[in-house]
Amino acid sequence: MTTEPSADLAYLKRMALAGRGRAAPALVLMAVFGFVYGVTFLLNHLLMVIGWDRVEASGWWPVLRFSFLAGHLIFLAAALWTGWRYLQPDRPRVSRAAGAVWSGAFVAFVVTTVAIILFSRNEPPTDEVFAVYFHGPILLVLWGMAWWATAFLTERRWLLLVAAGSFGFALAIAWVGMANPLMVLMGASLLLLAFLPAVILLREGRA
């Protein structure tokens, strides 16, 4: 009579730890991705406003070019570290439901990307570029769906704000199209919807 309630309590504890346990290593990759490329988009917009000719004439272009390369290398190092951590026996565990949500969103984005490429394969280059610019809103919609599900799975309702922000940025980026605010919106979305949530979740996991 006593073993069954104890087993139920142990099961509930495992479920709670799976949803609210220490942060998965992918959060570090998410934080690095959001920061590096968010800053890159904002810096590119600033360079466009200043003017590429003035930047090259100022002598700062080699430094900026090196900073862009360094950003790619930092992200690559974070990706390799994340892959290495996932291969370790003591890797942080996440719930199967959360894993299914994020892996499903990733697969959906890959399939959608391939579908867009196939759809625009016979278009001239001047028209094909318009299909490429729709990747951003699609990614943000899938990103918002994943955060929406994660908010309920982990009982972190503040993640609903991240999901709502993803949907809002998707509409805003679709609205501006190829206009100048595009890079600002992309940079802000990466910092607010990838870097910031990842840092908060990492801090929660260490608390």
Image (cartoon, rainbow, N blue to C red):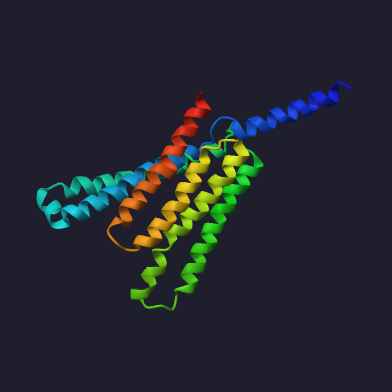
Q: Is residue 205 left or right of residue 10?
A: left
Q: Residue at x 50, y 50 (%)?
A: 143
Q: Position of residue 12 (x, y in %)?
A: 72, 30
Please, which residue is most extreme toward the left here?
Answer: 57
Q: Position of residue 66 (x, y in %)?
A: 25, 46
**The image quarter in which residue 194 lies:** top left
Return the residue found at the far top.
2
Front residue (pair 78, 141): 141
Residue 177 vertical placement versus 31 (above, below)? below
Which corner quadrant holds the N terminus?
top right
Q: Is residue 85 left or right of residue 73?
A: right
- Can you say whether 53 is above or below 64 in the image? below
Residue 133 appears in the figure: yes
Please tell me which residue is depicted at 43% across the width and 39% down the height of the picture.
31
Residue nearer the viewer, 70 or 22 = 22
Q: Is residue 13 left or right of residue 182?
A: right
Q: Is residue 92 above or below residue 132?
A: above
Q: Residue at x 47, y 52 (%)?
A: 167
Residue at 48% in and 68% down = 116
**Where residue 65 sits: x, y (%)?**
23, 49
Could you tell me residue 192's position as x and y percent?
40, 42
Callout count: 0
Can I make out residue 77 in this image? Answer: no
Give 103 or 4, whichever is nearer the viewer. Answer: 4
